[in-house]
Image (cartoon, rainbow, N blue to C red):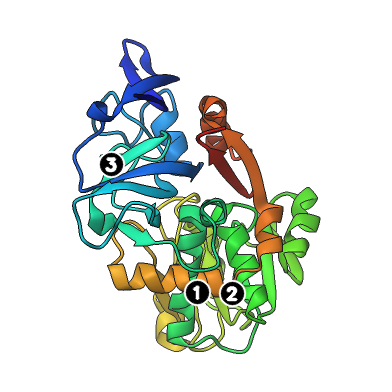
Amino acid sequence: MTFKALMVEKTDDGTQAAVTDLTLEDLPEGEVTVAVEYSTVNYKDGLCIGPGGGLVRTYPHVPGIDFAGTVETSSDDRYTPGDKVVLTGWRVGEAHWGGYAQKARVKADWLVPLPEGLTTRQAMAVGTAGFTAMLAVQALEDQGLTAGPVLVTGAAGGVGSVAVALLSAMGREVAAVTGRPEQADYLTGLGASRIVPREDLNETLKRPLESETWGGCVDAVGGPMLARVLGQMEYGASVAAVGLAGGAALPATVIPFLLRGVNLLGIDSVMQPYENRVRAWAKLAEVLPMEKLEAMVVPATLGDLPGLGVDILKGQVRGRVVVDVNG
């Protein structure tokens, strides 16, 4: 029996991605075989699909850093055929074949049972980006959010969009940062009560401390913007940093940490302990408003992926691209 997959091959000119036929014998080793139903498109997927190959370790390769589907076979007692499961992280789609195929075989430890109340499509509307957003919001809650509005940078992207919707659903006032005025209606529809132009936070840091403005921040940008935001946090407030789109350098000082007790929380969704993953997915199923989730979804198929991989690297993809691998 054959099934469809997006395969990235190494060529003399770089890499080439195309939909091809595979068999179960082609799949890598693992305790659980899953009939994949949906995956997503993230920035890392663009790097894996793109001409340079990006994060891919070995070729040929099936990208897709997350997926949701139904267990077909399992040698691990935790999963039986028919179970609905979701997978994010663990270098799937980078070092191990991922979700851009109608079948996947992975280690049982990498999976999480799909929580009650979420379909596989909804789980991938959340996807790695939404899962990361939930980890960031959980980290802010664990530290104790202060009274002011919560800032979300990179708000129109995958992580930012879900963070805005989550925080709004939890009753927080949300300020959304974007460089595109045309995204204002989209962000207010997700629950943002205020739109902050990106240029307001892109100026070079002039003073290590500015007026106390934000009670928390989910930062999906990093770089100079993060440095600027640190100086605007309320006393004891926290910033959960999840992305490096603005660069890995942090042109800041220690003053916000020393004089205002600001906390900088690093969020990595790749190798989260099982308990953290279960907690995050359960909270997502409980809190995230599904009508707002649907507003973020851009549907796609395997055949759309080569072009979408290029678009996401150019910053031209808004919201959550959900890939129906059987469509």
Q: Is mark 2 on a helix, strand or loop?
A: helix
- In contact (CB < 8 Å): disc 1 and disc 2: yes
Residue at mark 1 to residue at mark 2: CA–CA distance: 6 Å
Q: Nearer the viewer, residue 190 or 86?
A: 86
Left or right: where 141 falls relative to 169: left
Q: Earlier in the sequence, mark 3 or mark 2?
A: 3
Q: In which quarter of the image is residue 11?
A: top left
Residue at mark 3 to residue at mark 2: CA–CA distance: 31 Å
Image location of residue 73, percent across then percent down? 27, 46
Q: Is 46 placed above or below 229 here?
A: above
Image location of residue 250, percent across then percent down? 42, 60
**Circle 1 Cα neighbour tier, 10 Å, few/some/many (<14 / 14–19 / ≥20):** some
Which residue is tagged 3? Answer: 105
Q: Quadrant of the C terminus?
A: top right
Q: Which of 83 and 229 is in front in this view?
A: 83
- In contact (CB < 8 Å): disc 3 and disc 2: no
Q: Residue at x 69, y 70 (%)?
A: 175
Q: Residue at x 39, y 65 (%)?
A: 267
**Which residue type carries mark 1?**
Lys
- In contact (CB < 8 Å): disc 3 and disc 1: no
Q: Residue at x 65, y 54 (%)?
A: 156
Q: In which quarter of the image is the N terminus?
A: top left
Foreground label between 3 and 2: 3
Which residue is tagged 2? Answer: 287
Which residue is tagged 1? Answer: 283
Q: Which of marks 3 and 1 is nearer the N terminus?
A: 3
Q: In which quarter of the image is residue 192?
A: bottom right
Left or right: where 217 falls relative to 148: left
Foreground label between 3 and 1: 3
Q: What element carries label 3?
A: strand
Q: Is 301 placed above or below 91 here?
A: above
Q: Which of 284 and 43 is in front in this view?
A: 284
